[in-house]
Amino acid sequence: MTIGKAVELLDAEVLSGNVDLNKEIETICGSDMMSDVLAFIKKNALLLTGLCNPQVIRTAEMLDIICIAFIRGKTPTEEMIRMAEECGIYIIKSNLPMYESCGRLYQERGF
């Protein structure tokens, strides 16, 4: 699945500049607990989270996560978006809840 397809499925807004919508996502993780993300995520992943603080960006940077989708209408600060862009992480935002976000992506899975 591409980032562009995920944006479409999540009815998401792209918050990062210069997003490569054709970049391939290898896996998807949905969690608000960064300890679970640290334990289970694989590289080239899309992270779905409602946790909206700079620690999410730092966790994503350590794990080679390529895109973070802030769900439930959470809006990251400009500083968080800048931090992510400096790390090469794309930021998108969706108003969907976690359950529906995961369901839409799972239904369309190509994994």
Image (cartoon, helix red, strand yellow):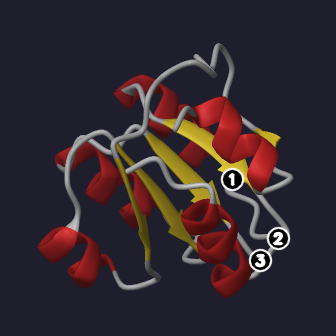
How busy is the neighbourhood of tag 2: few (under 14 within 10 Å), some, or many (20 plus)? few
For badge 1, the amino acid type reads Thr
Instruction: Report x, y in % for residue 55.
Output: 37, 65
For badge 3, the amino acid type reads Arg
Please report contact status of discs 2 and 3: CB closer than 8 Å, yes or no. yes
Q: CA distance from mark 1 to mark 3?
A: 15 Å
Q: Nearer the viewer, mark 1 or mark 3?
A: 3
* Front residue of this view, candidates 2 and 94: 2
Instruction: Report x, y in % for residue 100.
Output: 73, 80
Please report contact status of discs 2 and 1: CB closer than 8 Å, yes or no. no
Q: Which mark is residue 35?
A: none
* Front residue of this view, candidates 61 and 12: 12
Element type at mark 2 = loop
Q: Which mark is residue 77?
A: 1
**Residue 90 location, quadrant:** top right
Return the residue at label 3: 72
Q: Is residue 76 toward the left or the right of residue 54 in the image?
A: right
The residue drawn where x is 64% and y is 81% is 98
Return the residue at label 2: 73
For badge 2, the amino acid type reads Gly
Element type at mark 3 = loop
